[in-house]
Structure formats: C-alpha cells, structure tokens
Image: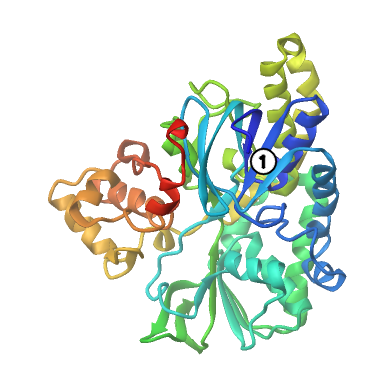
Amino acid sequence: MSTHTNVAIIGAGPAGMMAAARLTSRNHSVIVLDEQPQAGGQIWRNIMGTTTGLAGILGPDYAAGAAVAGQFAACGAQHLRGATVWNLTRERQLHYLHEGQTHTLTADAVILATGAMERPFPIPGWTLPGVMGAGAAQVLLKGSGTVPATPVVIAGCGPLLYLICWQYLRANVQIAAVLDTSSGKDIFQASPALLTGLAAFGDIRKGLSMINAIKEKKIPFYRGVQNLRVLGEASVRSISFEHQGQTHELDTNLVLLHQGVVPNTQFTWLLRAAHDWSDTGACWIPKADAWGRLHELDGIYLAGDGQGIAGAQAAVTRGELAALAVDARLNPVQADSLENRSTPLRSRLKKDMALRPFLDAAYMPKRENRIPHDDTIVCRCEEVTAGQIRDFVQQGCMGPNQAKSFSRCGMGPCQGRMCGLTVTEVIADQLKVAQDQVGYYRIRAPLKPVTLAELACATHSEF
C-alpha cells in the first residue's frame, strides 16, 4: 500500500472525481479515499451500478453523473473503496481504515471533497422509529431501489423535498401528504433574486415541473405549515401541524424530514481552519479562496459543497478549480498562469450558482425548526434537550465545548454532526449574541469509530 502520493483526495463525489481526473491528466499521482463501495458520492451514489429503470426514476440530473464517473474510472487514479479517513493533520498526514486495518498516508497536497450533509431537523418526535431524513431515503433508493411499502408523509423545505416526491411518484410510492414549511410569502420575498437566476432558467423549469407533478396527482400539499410534531410512543403514529390557523393531524407510520443540506465541516474543524457563520445558509462555511485553498493551511484544499451548497454541477467545476490550484502548487511553472487558466471555470461556476441566492432566500429553514422548544431532544446520542442546553447557559455555559462538560452533548458516536448547528444556535439565541461569538465544537480525532484491534494493526512507523 502506498504511503506517499502527490495528491490525496478525500471523497469520490462530483468534486473529488473531477479533481482526480484533471490531476492525473497532468501526470500527478493521485489516491482517492472514499467510504462507499463505488464512486459517485451521495448525489450520484451507485451511478455506475444502477439499472436503466432506476436511473429513469431518479431522473436526468442523476444520470448525468455517469459521464463524470466514467472519466474518473478511466483516469488512472488509485481509488480506495471502503476507506474511512479518521484523522488528518495540518502536515497533510492521513490516517484511515481499510479492510479492517489502519494505514497512514502523506501527501504533497490534500483535497477535501467531503460534500454536504442533511441539516438537523430537531422537532418533537424526530428521534422516533419511523422518522428518517429525506436524504437517507434517497440513499436507499439510489443504492438498492428500496422504497416505502406504506404511505409516507414528507415534511420540511428545500428543493430536495420536491425531488424526492417526484422520484417517489415515478417509483409508484404512495405519498400521504407534503408539508412544506416555506410559504408563498417566502417565495415572493425571494423573487427579486430570480433576476440573477435567469441564467439557470432550466433549473427553474425543472423545479416547477416537479411541483406540478405533485399537484397533478392531487397529493395533499400544505404550504407554510408550522408547529410540526411527530406523535407516537414506541414508533411514529401520526404527525400534527398548523396550517392557516388550524391544527391538523395525519395518521402515518413513516415521516421523511428535510430542511436543506449544509457543508460537512468535520475535517475543517479538525484542522482548526477558520470558519464564518453564514446568515443566508444558517451554517458554518470554511474560509477558502476561489480555488479552494483553505485559509492559513498549507497545501490543503476544499472542493464541492464543503465550500458552500451549490449542487452537483457546481461541485464538478469547483473540483476542476481545486485541481488547477494543486497543479500550480506541484508544478510551479504553472503558477503564473493560474488566474488565466481558471477564468473559464470561474465563469461557468457563476452560471452554475445563478439560482442559489433565490433558493437560499426562498427555502431558509424556519427559526422554530432550527432553534427548538425546551422539550425537544437536540443531541440524539446523549438525549440532551434544548431546555437542558438553555439551563446550562443560565449556569454559565458560554459555548458548545462547555456544553460537553455539562452533559456530554456532542460526545456520542456522531461526534456532534447531528447536534452541532442546533447547539450553536440555541446558545447564541439564549445569550442574545451572534453565532460567531459562540463558535462550534472542538473536533478531535478519531472522526469515525476506530477499535483498539484496528489501531494495533498499524506499524510503529505509521504513528
């Protein structure tokens, strides 16, 4: 197994695949590490192994991933499938698990192409069996064609909400209702951003066609819902909500929740990279330049939705931009021409992101769904409620790291992924300060669980 490479890329999604293809074409040695058995990331999961029928259900945007995956497969990069990177240092040393053993790899440059994750949706009952993220449901659909056998309620906001509905309709899944937390007023207020989004008219048309498909099937569609609560004891029994001043309750044993995606920042926090709080995205975004070079981190780059949510095509372009910057680093003669070489890509990226201001404004998750009531569980791993977090603040807790000391909040198997944003917002709201003043968890290795037996397999030279 190689212990050194020119470029190590973490993640084989759109950005990682394209970056690898571009860098190998410049004769750099590239190793791509990814947890999945096949390339594609979450958005193009199983793209090279899917059937024609399933590809038809998932739609043309999914099928478009085959071209990028084909370039990646043919480029000659070393692709480590099922490799879990559990540590990365500022000196570009990676520790990862592969086939039951831990290994160490050093690189002249590292590209983080770890993509996005579903935003936490902490409402009462969200931890009950029978509640899933819409993104998790998509993983089952893409990976194995698995779909619900019973009627499903889909609740939340954002483009993926409509996409999963559209895909489920094509797969003959019965949808009991769609509960959209965004309102007509939200769409109206965001409409000025459409002036800059006209370059993405095709995407606008696709979105409208999905909404029309839902309406044509006469699926109950509630827009501007509030006070979502999943009800049940051992599992989901029903979901209640308010719509136009009236309270409704729908019987169901399966609820899919979604309110957008956010950058997966675990690696950048591990590296102590600088982050900014985005008010438009209500999330943390690592500080990086136009080529993905992370602020004050030598030789470590960011590509794809980790730079801010923009979608698959933008991720491909960002992967190419990062590859250009890495090539300039490894081949200094190219450094002077970096600006000129990247101009066409930056123009394409601007077009790829033309609709993003409208989407961010129209589908901003509601405050009540980001900053929950006292009785709602925030940390699923340790079963810590929002009310407990507020009590800790009253006792002097000033940030997420102190919250760990009070309750182990953020110390479970997910390492804070499912509660980090919520804890930041709850504490900031309670203290009446900006999220930047509260900060985030201090992330430490291992990022993923590692057994003592797996560590014991490493040689002394690897540590």
- Quarter of the image for residue 381 reads bottom left
Q: Is residue 214 left or right of residue 294?
A: right
Q: In this rendering, does residue 195 appear at all? A: no
42 shown above or below 137: above
Q: Disc 1 marks which amino acid?
A: Val
Tally the marks: 1
Q: Give the percent coordinates (x, y) of residue 3.
A: 59, 32
Q: Quadrant of the C terminus?
A: top left
Q: Nearer the viewer, residue 167 or 281?
A: 167
Q: Nearer the viewer, residue 219 or 110?
A: 110
Q: Give the percent coordinates (x, y) of residue 195.
A: 73, 43
Residue at position x 42%, y 46% from top? 455
Q: Give the percent coordinates (x, y) of residue 107.
A: 59, 27
279 shown above or below 89: below
Q: Nearer the viewer, residue 190 or 408?
A: 408
Q: In this rendering, does residue 301 appear at all? A: yes
Residue at position x 68%, y 86% from top? 174
Q: Nearer the viewer, residue 135 or 201?
A: 135
Tell which residue pokes out farthest to the left in this image.
Answer: 395
Residue at position x 67%, y 37% from top? 31
Numbered disc 1: secondary structure: strand
Q: Give the percent coordinates (x, y) of residue 22.
A: 79, 32
- Quarter of the image for residue 50 reads bottom right
The residue beneath circle 1 is: 32
265 shown above or below 252: above
Q: Residues within 10 Å of mark 1 (few under 14, many from 20)?
A: many
Q: Is residue 404 left or right of residue 297?
A: left
- Quarter of the image for residue 44 reads bottom right
Q: Quadrant of the N terminus?
A: top right
350 shown above or below 57: above
